[in-house]
Image (spheres, helix red, strand yellow):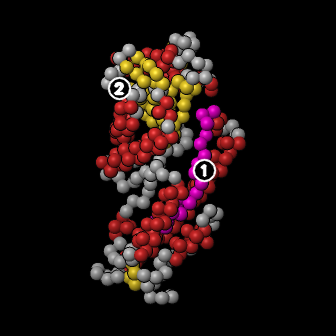
Amino acid sequence: MVARVIPERLCCKTRSAHLYKRCAFVWAKGMLHSPLNPWLERDANMAIYHLRATMISRSAGRSATAAAAYRSAERIHDHRTGLSFDYRARGGVEHVEILAPERSPEWVRDRAALWNAVERAETRKNSQVAREIRVALPAELDREQRIAPVRDLCPRSFVDRGMVADIALHAPGREGDERNHHAHILLTTREIGPEGFTTKNRDWNAKELLEDWREDWARDSNHALERCGHEARIDHRTLEAQREAALERSVQAHERGDEAEALRETVRAVELDRAPLPQLSPGAWQLKERGIEVAAVQLWREVKAQALEVARVAERLSDQVREWLGRTMERLAPGHELAYSGAD
């Protein structure tokens, strides 16, 4: 008996047709060892990974006070410009808190005082007043559990280096993906001591540091998922790197005779065989939310549609494999193996 997974019927244009050929080929020889229950019960879903770092700059017409008020759903009066930003009526903010280095003055824990001090410390019209880290929170976790990985990340990655971290956890919007739980982390860009802010720390702009943050977030999120009993995991690597790793694991599993694992990893590679979703600027994102189509938004929608198509193909491949394995288990008596017997 040979498993039949027929990608030609799935009608999806992908970048790597060889992945689908392997789905049909991977069962072409070798032994499929019983029992298969662990493979069938294994949760192959991947939690969503997203970490994006951006600068809040006056040259883009932005301010730290406005950003902090919006993300925390509070009212902050900007002493420098005389403007007041009042977002107390907005919903969806599930948790806010401020974490600061030990030697910081007490006023840093007052959000309005903190970000007014940040604005006061910057004198140039094009100053970068704050850094924002936005992360996707695992939707598998509940409200209290989602706080834990953010609290794990901020002290080690930001506060211990000298930054003040202003955290706001947001629920998904009324429209859109209901899994879109996320956190905004506003970070200061200057060193801080008992008397307040001092010099800019340019080392915090290093690309290598951003890569460390990406890896840290994956680790902290996965620890939270594991603590709460979830099999899902996130991965900070590029889609291409993840896809190549899945194919390598598939080859290794095939070589040791574990054909079920080999096919599972091949299906995983199919799922990853897509282009990354392009990043939208804050302005383009606002236009998208208002239903205004510009070139960047149109490209984002096209890539997202392609990703959904690939996900549907991977899901159908997985369903076919699970169905076939389920039928196989029903035919096998305990202690027996299913061997390839040539052409059917």
**Residue at x 54% of width, y 12% of height:** 80
Above or below 319: residue 342: below
**Residue at x 48% of width, y 35% of height:** 133
Above or below 191: residue 220: below
Position in image of residue 136 (x %, y %): 47, 42
Location of residue 83 (image quadrant): top right
Amino acid type of the residue that numbered disc 2 sits on in the rendered structure: Pro
- Between 326 and 35, the residue placed more toward the observer is 35
Q: Which residues are magenta?
A: 264-283
Above or below 174: residue 139: below
- Between 82 and 169, the residue placed more toward the observer is 82
The number of callouts visible is 2
Q: Is residue 302 left or right of residue 50?
A: right
Q: Is residue 282 left or right of residue 219?
A: right
Q: CA distance from mark 2 to mark 1?
A: 40 Å
Q: Is residue 170 left or right of residue 309?
A: left
Q: Is residue 75 visible?
A: no
Position in image of residue 266 (x %, y %): 49, 67
Dot 1 lies on which element? helix
Q: Which residue is mark 2?
A: 101
**Residue at x 39% of width, y 28% of height:** 162
Mark closest to the chain's N terminus, 2 or 1 = 2
Dot 2 crowding, Cα within 10 Å, few <14, some 14–19, many 20+: many
Amino acid type of the residue that numbered disc 1 sits on in the rendered structure: Lys
Dot 1 crowding, Cα within 10 Å, few <14, some 14–19, many 20+: some
Q: Please tell me whether residue 265 belongs to the stretch shown in magenta.
A: yes
Q: Please tell me whether residue 2 belongs to the stretch shown in magenta.
A: no
Q: Which residue is mark 1?
A: 304
